């Protein structure tokens, strides 16, 4: 029955949001991202206009995900079996969410980067700039460590599978080296995006699990950073 009181309408709306959060993983991810943005706003000196723009962007993404969930439910109700038009309707709704998310990501980057990048560059400057020799040694150390892990586990091949993702380890070792060499936030961010894409491809191709990729990323970053810092201390 259609609610007649305002409070009943609000309760129905809240129940709809709770349903979407409970049954849609992407909705939960959007809410977590919103919490991260709000946490960043608390620690950064964001202006009132910037805060308004961030709130509008986040709200638009959540709105798009709610509409997408509603469309998916209606399509499943009308067409429980596979139909190309039903698939197209879901794809278009998902495209709307992706468009909103990209716009929110660009907005967040433009607003938060000028607050975060100076701290990031200052932190890299405190660590120092490694030499070419140190960089090569760090990356080779990561490769050797991955080979040792694969040999001890006896699982997979040098280029496919295994307890640790070698691609992820090397990719994130390169991210660490590029960040310290350039000390440029943009270069670090772009390299990080490439490393994430490489790691994600290992999962989608079925060569590694999420745990193996994360373990490789941690080994690559921690080991390369340790080796680079030792070389810089010795020099």
Image (tube, rainbow, N blue to C red):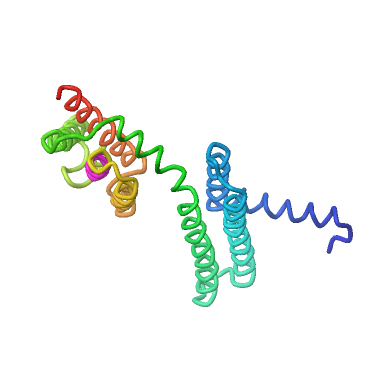
Q: Quadrant of residue 72?
A: bottom right
Question: Which residue in the rendered view is the most extreme toward the top?
Answer: 234
Question: Which residue in the rendered view is the most extreme toward the bottom?
Answer: 85
Give the residue displayed 58% in from the left and 38% down from the top. Answer: 42
Instruction: Tell me where residue 202 appears, x and y as whole percent.
Output: 29, 50
Question: Is residue 64 left or right of 121 when viewed as pictured?
Answer: right
* Residue 169 on the magenta segment: yes
Instruction: Tell me where residue 8 appears, x and y as whole percent.
Output: 84, 54
Tell which of 146 and 230 is nearer to you: 230
Give the residue displayed 45% in from the left and 52% down from the top. Answer: 109
Instruction: Tell me where residue 181 appears, x and y as whole percent.
Output: 22, 40
Q: Is residue 134 above or below residue 2?
A: above
**Numbered label tally:** 0
Tell which of 133 and 21 is nearer to you: 133
Instruction: Tell me where residue 127 appears, x and y as whole percent.
Output: 28, 30
Give the residue displayed 29% in from the left and 52% down from the top. Answer: 194
Overall secondary structure of the magenta section: helix
Question: Which residue in the rendered view is the most extreme toward the right?
Answer: 4
Question: Is residue 160 left or right of 24 when viewed as pictured?
Answer: left
* Residue 99 on the magenta segment: no
* Rendered-image quadrant of the N terminus: bottom right
* Rendered-image quadrant of the C terminus: top left
Give the residue displayed 62% in from the left and 60% down from the top. Answer: 63
Magenta-tinted stretch = 166-176
Question: Is residue 88 left or right of 66 when viewed as pictured?
Answer: left
Q: Is residue 230 above or below residue 70?
A: above
């Amino acid at each position: 029955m259609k609610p007649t009181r305002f409070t009943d309408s609000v309760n129905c709306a809240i129940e709809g949001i709770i349903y979407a959060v409970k049954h849609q993983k992407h909705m939960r991810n959007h809410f977590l991202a919103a919490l991260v943005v709000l946490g960043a706003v608390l620690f950064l000196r964001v202006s009132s206009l910037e805060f308004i723009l961030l709130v509008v962007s986040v709200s638009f993404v959540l709105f798009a995900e709610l509409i997408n969930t509603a469309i998916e439910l209606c399509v499943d109700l009308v067409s429980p079996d596979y139909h190309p038009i039903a698939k197209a309707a879901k794809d278009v709704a998902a495209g709307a969410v992706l468009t909103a998310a990209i716009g929110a990501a660009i907005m967040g980057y433009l607003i938060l980067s000028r607050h975060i990048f100076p701290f990031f560059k200052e932190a890299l400057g405190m660590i120092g700039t490694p030499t070419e020799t140190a960089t090569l040694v760090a990356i080779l150390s990561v490769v050797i460590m991955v080979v040792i892990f694969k040999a001890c586990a006896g699982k997979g091949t040098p280029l496919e599978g295994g307890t640790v993702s070698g691609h992820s380890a090397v990719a994130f070792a390169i991210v660490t080296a590029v960040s310290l060499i350039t000390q440029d936030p943009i270069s670090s961010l772009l390299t990080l995006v490439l490393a994430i894409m490489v790691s994600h491809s290992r999962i989608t191709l079925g060569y590694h699990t999420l745990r193996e990729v994360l373990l490789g990323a941690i080994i690559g970053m921690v080991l390369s950073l340790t080796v680079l810092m030792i070389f810089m201390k010795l020099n």
